[in-house]
Image: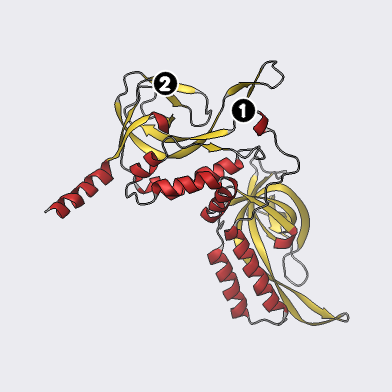
Amino acid sequence: MSEQSIPDPDVHLPILVDPAVQRSIDQMHEFQAELDLQPNAPIHRVQEMVQQLDAGWFHMGELVSLSGNVECSVIDVEQQETETGELRSTLMTKMREDGEPQTCTYFARDVEFTSRGFTADTEPFMVGGLQVGVRTVLRMTFTRNVALNLPDQELPQQLVLHNHATVDEISMDFRRDSLEYNRLKSLEYFPEFMAEVEKRIDGTNRIAEDIMALKGLEATINPDIMGDAEVRALEAYVDELISVEQDDLPYALKFREGTMAYDPYEKEDVLGEYEDGPTLMARVLGVRLTRKTETLPVSNGYGTTTDPTIIEPRIAIQLLNADVEDDSVEVEVRLADVEVLCSIRQSFYLGLEEADEAE
């Protein structure tokens, strides 16, 4: 097994792109091509384009780590006279002679912004050195909160900077991916595992049944997958398939005797042990896929090595009557150790439906 975990330098994982992001970028390019054919585009058509792009943008209002050329308004410090005659520094947007805000372009390197969708700017349309019209350019827009210290103020002044960027000149790293992207990566990197998951949950009608269907299922990690990003994508997709968040009422759980409760963040840290296998009440937070580490002898016979080549399903829960120190602690438990999992809500309502059918 340890020999299988050595990455093959000649094997490269495919570069995948989030379909939800790519659709918006492709649509923006289509709109830009249309605008380039009509320099003086009607304002209502430009507004329709921006509204359509904003409506389809998956990451609206979310944080994004951005690198590339970014355009921002120039902020200047001006002295203004107060009612008492004192001069006080204030931040102002520097304006051009034509009344438009003065801008500057800078290179951002992994700077965190908030994505605000799309916008449209205008620039002169030149032919042979003469301006013959106005060209409309679609750009992405972002905001960033900064704190600036002014010499005559004790507390820093909070400022929201508005930034524009051309999509082809930047790279973006988002905090979450779309369901489509997680599915794409799951099927690409873990095809056998996903085929088994979809087979097991096909035809089930309760969330608890979906979760328990994963019991005993493991996946071998592609040795060329060195980080956790692909495993997290698989976890997110499985979690969305089962849709645990649809049932917010407690579940009844019973564990095997000796079941370990693990820290959901430090995966190998044990928070407690259930010696008598009690039935507990808990809120199910989701399905987690955790690297299962095994200590194996190295090939040369000297020492041991940890070989995290297997992922196993766990269940993340918030215990409501816990045997560990915190009365509402969040823990992870190996799904293999769960003997009973029963949703209070689904058992009640499905029980009523079954009773109605019997009558």
Where is residue 5, by image quadrant? top right
Q: Is residue 198 left or right of residue 180?
A: left
* Disc 2 residue type (three-letter): Gly
What element does badge 1 sit on?
Answer: loop
Q: Which residue is mark 2?
A: 272
What element does badge 2 sit on?
Answer: strand
Farthest-out residue, right: 128
Where is residue 329, by image quadrant? top left
93 in relation to 50, above or below: above
Which residue is at the front of the view, 279 or 248? Answer: 279
Quarter of the figure that contains the N terminus = top right
* Disc 1 residue type (three-letter): Asp
Picture coordinates of residue 78, whole percent (x, y): 73, 55
Which residue is at the front of the view, 187 or 272? Answer: 187
| Mark 1 nearby-residue class (10 Å; few <14, some 14–19, many ≥20) | many
Answer with mark 2 or mark 1, whichever residue precedes in sequence: 2
Picture coordinates of residue 330, whole percent (x, y): 42, 31
Which residue is at the front of the view, 37 or 156? Answer: 37
For discs 2 and 1, the disc positioned in front in the rendered view: 1
Colour convention of the picture: secondary structure
Picture coordinates of residue 271, whole percent (x, y): 45, 22
Picture coordinates of residue 3, whole percent (x, y): 67, 30
Q: Is residue 103 left or right of residue 320?
A: right
Q: Is residue 199 left or right of residue 114?
A: left
Q: Is residue 330 left or right of residue 131?
A: left
Where is residue 259, by image quadrant? top left
Residue 289 visible in image: yes
Q: Which residue is mark 1?
A: 307
The residue at the point 65 percent across, 43 percent down is: 156
Farthest-out residue, top: 302
